[in-house]
Amino acid sequence: MTPIDRPRPAPRRSALYLPASNAKALAKARTLPCDVVILDLEDAVAPEAKEEARAAAIAAIAEGGFGRREVAIRVNGLDTEWGAADLEAVAASKADAILVPKVNSPQDIDRLQAALAGAHEAMQLWAMIETCASVFALEPIAAKARSTRLSLWIMGLNDLAKEMRAQSVPERTPFLPFLSMAVAAARAHDVTVLDGVCNEFRDLAVFEAEARQGLLFGFDGKSLIHPAQIDPCNTVFSPSAVDVEWANAVIAAFALPENQGKGAIKVDGKMTELLHLEQARQLVAVSEQILRQAQDDRA
Ligand code: COA
Ligand code: MG
């Protein structure tokens, strides 16, 4: 199968975190238009609420009601007092994915893979990329996707900033090399890669600028902390009408009898190659999937 024939994963434009200990947010998440819901047991949950949050997350998965949304549980690190119990509970659940914080190395992925031996077959392993050590192991970590459950990364810039002692500015200057290296490593091994959160949840102009920056870097979507961020995020990470028009023009041009067997042709006055045809087909496939999803959501 060529990459284009392979079934594409559902779009992951918007991945909303919520503290699993927050019952109201949990109920609300089932009705929100995000593509992914992340039930957090880690940073968003205070130490005294960890056990309760774990139980609530497991109960929510058992209860279901999330429809088309993929649901992940973010566990505490394995080096914390809650990590082992979190992992055991999630591995026995029907969650779509387990999201593990502070992954540093390919060996970490091997250990997690072994710990998930008894999990249901489709359970994916998702990794937070958020430590200084991971910056120097991006490619070997991504390469583990070829032989393990690893399928998706989420950037964690709040933790990275803390560890680097870098300052968080709207332009995200200190993190730009890291962001582009992470996207390249993920792409090299077909790993889905989501941008970090924007803490500024009351200012949607700031959010949208950051989401557009993420799109520019090549991210598949963005992780979110508040429902208000979902719609702008979905808009930014959905193919635009102009993109779809371009893609259809490219597909139509390559289908013309006079262009059969050609590697490079002219479309709208621009040089267009077979690689653009592949991009165009992918774009149309994603756009159709998003349309179908929106129809299902309305039904
Ligand atoms: N998921 C689902 N629902 C959420 C939500 C989330 N992440 N954040 C807020 N809501 C709900 C609230 O429960 C509230 O519901 P209601 O209208 O039924 O009362 C509504 O959205 C509006 O919330 P609002 O009052 O604007 O926010 P808040 O002040 O209650 O909460 C935060 C602000 C930041 C504490 C909250 O958004 C949050 O906990 N976000 C996630 C944090 C997290 O998981 N961090 C870890 C990853 S970095
Ligand atoms: Mg963190």
Image (cartoon, helix red, strand yellow):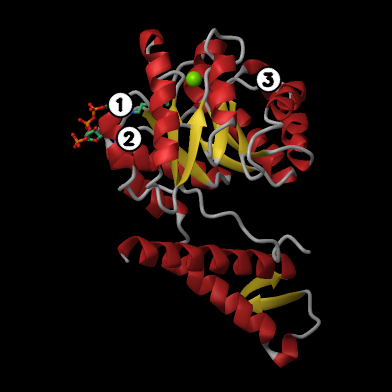
Q: Mark 1: give few (<14), some (14-19) or many (20+) Cα within 10 Å.
A: some
Q: Is there a contact, CB below 8 Å, between mark 3 and mark 2?
A: no
Q: Mark 2: give few (<14), some (14-19) or many (20+) Cα within 10 Å.
A: many
| Comes first in the chain, label 3 or label 2 | 2
Q: CA distance from mark 3 to mark 1?
A: 29 Å
State yes or no: Cβ of the residue under disc 1 lies below 8 Å from any atom of ligand 1: yes
Q: Mark 3: give few (<14), some (14-19) or many (20+) Cα within 10 Å.
A: many
Marker disc for residue 26: 2
State yes or no: Cβ of the residue under disc 2 lies below 8 Å from any atom of ligand 1: yes
Does residue 224 appear left or right of residue 28 in this picture?
A: right
For label 2, the SS is helix
Identify residue for label 3: 104
**Picture quarter with the C terminus:** bottom left
For label 1, the SS is loop
| Residue type beneath disc 1 | Asn
Does residue 21 appear left or right of residue 223 in this picture?
A: left
Marker disc for residue 22: 1
Q: Is residue 224 above or below residue 19?
A: below
Q: Is there a contact, CB below 8 Å, between mark 1 and mark 2?
A: yes
| Residue type beneath disc 2 | Leu
